[in-house]
Image (tube, grey):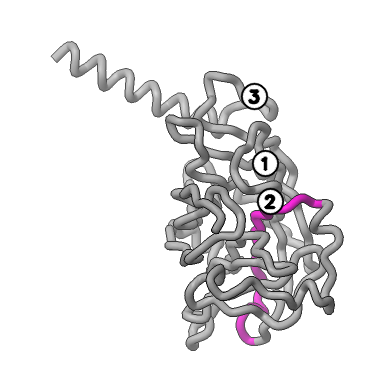
Amino acid sequence: MKKHHQTFLRRTLLCSFFVIALYGCSKDENTNDQARMLLGDEVTVGEGTARSFISLDSQGDPEQIGFTFTASTLENLPMHSAMFEIPVPKGNNSMVDHISFDFNAHGHEPPGVYDVPHFDIHFYNISKAERAVIQPNTAAMDLLPSAEYIPKDYAPIPGGDVNMGKHWTDTTGSEFHGKPFDKTFIYGSYNGMFIFHEAMVALSYLQTKQNVTMPVKQQAKVQVGGYYPAAFSITFDEAKQLYTISMDNLQRRIAQ
């Protein structure tokens, strides 16, 4: 009984440590004691704050990447679109170079589908310098990845966005079948390569404060080796008034 009590106590203390590591540390604390959770710098986003994180497995490989933001972020949102950069943690060995948390006050194309206030959360696998040369109405924008790299049921939206690329949507999504858009997962390409993953979520859905995890449809082959998400999550912690958006169950894949 004494041994069982000691084991339980150690587990309780360990769980408490990780909660403190994610939510209670100063901006630049990434010590060896926190090796299983890497934290990015906290940044101001609107009326709130946001902070990225990477969860590591026992081998030091990334198994989840995402960011948290306070509920106050959704207060007094602008009537125009706004972009916020969320720095990734130091020592990052995931595929993600940086995260862009973008608010679309009036939505975007296609009309009647995504033209509602929503957030686009881009997890870019390329650098900001590489993004800076991306332009619409170019041959590079219209050059699509070959068929074996395209996820099942995904199709490109015509055109493309400056400093982003061409967005690919899941054609089986409920928003294409008579239901209002609430959340989806997007792929992005440029010059024949997939360059970002994106969680897209309506403001109205975030305001419901639901918790959801959804599978990510996979590519049969990948062009770049690295850690790819098998799922993505949107959660809300009522006690901490904190949202989390993450790419989960990262799987290492080899380029083919």
Q: Which mark is residue 88?
A: 1
Q: Which residues are magenta?
A: 112-128
Above/below status of 93 relative to 193? above
Above/below status of 227 relative to 3? below
Residue extending furthest toward the top? 2
Which residue is denoted by mark 2 in the rendering? 99
Residue 242 in the image: state x and y as whole percent. 55, 46
Q: Earlier in the sequence, mark 2 or mark 3?
A: 3
Disc 3, SS = loop
Residue 1 in the image: state x and y as whole percent. 13, 15
Disc 2, SS = strand
Camera-side mark, 3 or 1: 1
Q: What's under tag 1, amino acid-wise?
A: Val
Q: Earlier in the sequence, mark 1 or mark 2?
A: 1
Q: Which mark is residue 29?
A: 3
Where is the C terminus found, in terms of image quarters?
A: bottom right
